[in-house]
Image (tube, helix red, strand yellow):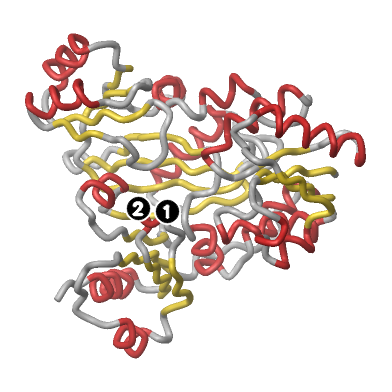
Amino acid sequence: MNFVFLSPHFPPNFYQFPVGLARAGARVLGIGEASWEELRPELKEAMSEYYRVESMNDYDQVVRAMGYFIHHHGLMDRIESHNEHWLLLEGALREDFNIFGPKRQATQTIKRKSLMKDVFRKAGIPVVRGEVYNDAAHARKFAKTVGYPFFAKPDIGVGAASTYKISNDRDLEEFIRSKPDCDYFMEEFIDGELFTFDGITNRDNEIVYYTSHYSDVGCYEAVALNDDLWYYSLRNIPEKLRDYGFRSVKAFDIREKFFHFEFFRRKTDGEFIPLELNCRPPGGFTTDMMNFTSDIDVYQQWANVVVQGRFTADVERKYHCAHIARKYGKNYRYSHEQIIDRYADKLVMYTEVSPVLAQVMGNLAYLARTPEEKEIRQIVQDIQALA
């Protein structure tokens, strides 16, 4: 199998995907902007060849790289990046080079929030009201229809980038005046807790692995309010969330890929309301959290599914594993050394976060695990407590 991996060096922990592919028997070919010297040794060893381009946003350059690989290695079988930013590029390349996986039209559906809502609705999953912004008059009418607050966010976007929480007429007029020049999606506000439904599918659109994560701090709060993000994996997944997750995977026809669905559990009635699909692994170190939760290797298992058609790990949700962020410039009650002394047996990872991701994921990330949900909440509280 010839496998093209786009931008294989970022995010930093994703080098493990090409390594897993090579171990599973694939010929891994990389395309990226980073120089060969910047790549870590394990990634260099995993790739049979690497083609550097000046800009991944220049489609002609990437097409030339693909042509070079085909000339030297034969037809390409798969192309992937696991990166939200390159999903549309992946779809174009798959279509132009007749490669398995979502093509241009399909990637529009898994990128545009407005189109996602139709798929959720057809799957029988309740959704809140939402419309693509047309003009100022339309936005004012939407506000009167749904009431304040409501959210306005790019129809194609990641996290909380350029997201507006509109709480009154003044906020609405500021949004109309300052919104970036791109398609915006306006959506009714949901007062709820955030749950994810994450996993891997095989080529037949069957889920071979799934898990869920919980938080009451979202990307918007982390960016707009400078809150410290935290979230942890669940050992017991609510049955309704599992049902909606399985229905969603089937409805979006996700094949041989990771999936990351976001739901709110509404506080008023406990209903799960879908926010969006990300047809990629969840961000940050969540893939590492999956490993720590069940003592497995999802990087290798995904590669096994793609190359060999099988998921071989025996999955048991042994632990709650939490991502606990800290940000520079805040005065925390406990020093790093005090946290290490108190929770040395529970901390499985501590690292700085790439500046590209830090606004949401924090500048510093602690990963901790324990079988007890009460204890994981206490660890979160202690690490993020301010002086």
Taking the image as shown, residue 161 lies to the left or right of residue 299, namely left
Using the image, tell me which numbered label, if any, was put on residue 254. Answer: none
Farthest front residue in view? 54
Disc 1: which residue: 357
Q: Nearer the viewer, residue 345 or 16?
A: 16
What residue do we see at 24% from left, 76% from top? 382
Which residue is pictured at 20% across the width and 21% down the height? Answer: 176
Image coordinates for residue 178, horizontal then vertical, percent: 22, 26
- The label shown at residue 360 is 2
Q: Secondary structure at mark 1?
A: loop
Residue 271: give x, y in percent of width and height.
28, 38
Residue at image coords 43%, 28%? 156
Q: Is 227 positioned to the left or the right of 123 in the image?
A: left
Say whether marks 2 and 1 touch (CB < 8 Å). yes
Please state, as top left, top right, bottom left or bottom right, where the N terminus lies in the image.
Answer: top right
Give SS at disc 2. helix
**Rendering coords of residue 14 (x, y %):** 60, 56
The quarter of the rendered structure image containing the C terminus is bottom left
Q: Amino acid at mark 1?
A: Leu
